[in-house]
Image: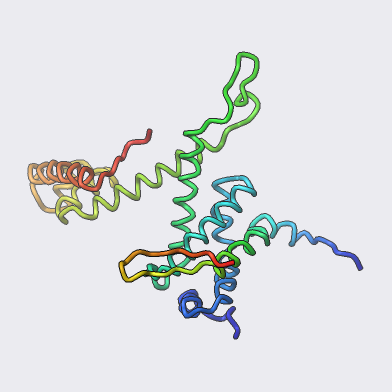
Amino acid sequence: MDYSKMSDSELIRSYLSGNEAPLEALISKNQQRIFSYILVRIQDQDLANDIFQDTFVKVINTLKRGKYNEEGKFLQWTMRIAHNLIIDHYRREKRMPTMSPTDEFNIFDVLKDNSLNVESSLIKEQIEADLHKLIDQLPEDQKEVLKLRHFSGLSFKEISDQTGVSINTALGRMRYALINLRKLMEKNNVSLLMQ
Amino acid sequence: MGNSTTLKDELGSHTKPRRETIRFILDYSKALEVKKLKSGVELHLIKN
């Protein structure tokens, strides 16, 4: 059977019916994008291979448990798993420093540490994604004011003109949006602070 | 003629996982068996 012409969904269906060969085709088809995604963020071939391996172990576990439900979006789903594993890696690394500087020698004097920037940008990316998910749960009128104010940078006068409500109403909606956002953060146990 | 590495191979090797990484994943998939008991408990078995 020519697996190279099959879509990801077809390959997954065939794999789930007990055929192992489509998995190789699925990996072959997507490996470059997933591996590059990991390598760019990790900048270490060995670690990138480990994370790629762990990503597919999770993919296989989920598929074999019958829990996969992202039809047609295999690549995005797999990238998300890889992304979370990259974040886990940086969190672990931060908790487990392997070297302490002495008076004579500090590794950071000779090595430029890009990983902290990469970590910060990944965490920032995650925080933004979490924030957008929470904002999407707000009532439409509150969501609109909050987005116009914080993402489009409009003044309350401009929001009032654009939405056709008074400035006081726009201010009130903003106030309720922030109150509700805080409640949603507590309910979902979400922290939007970079530590 | 002996084995030669082209520039394409060289560049490609940096944007793709190693063969042994892929081999491990495929072997893991073949070995893993997930069974669900009547009680709802899920067993992950690794076959030899």
Among the 4 quarters of the image, the one containing residue B31? bottom right
Q: Residue at x 60, y 17 (%)?
A: A102
Q: Residue at x 62, y 45 (%)?
A: A44
| Depth check, front residue: A170 or A64 | A64
Say above or below: A149 vs A107.
below
Q: Can residue A137 be seen in this view?
A: yes
| Depth check, front residue: A67 or A36 | A67
The residue sitting at the bottom extreme is A1
The residue sitting at the top extreme is A103
Specify whether B38 is left or right of B15: left
Among the 4 quarters of the image, the one containing residue A108? top right
Among the 4 quarters of the image, the one containing residue A112? top right
Q: Residue at x 90, y 65 (%)?
A: B2
Number of callouts: 0
Say above or below: A123 vs A81.
above
* Quarter occupied by the N terminus of chain A: bottom right
Say above or below: A69 vs A152.
below
Say above or below: A99 vs B5.
above
Residue A49 location (% of width, % of height): 61, 53
| Depth check, front residue: A167 or B14 | B14
Specify whether A168 is left or right of A186: left
Q: Which residue is drawn at 15% across and 42% down?
A: A179
Residue A20 location (% of width, % of height): 56, 75
Which colouring convention does the figure follow? rainbow
Residue A139 location (% of width, % of height): 15, 55
Q: Can residue A70 be seen in this view?
A: no
* Quarter occupied by the C terminus of chain A: top left
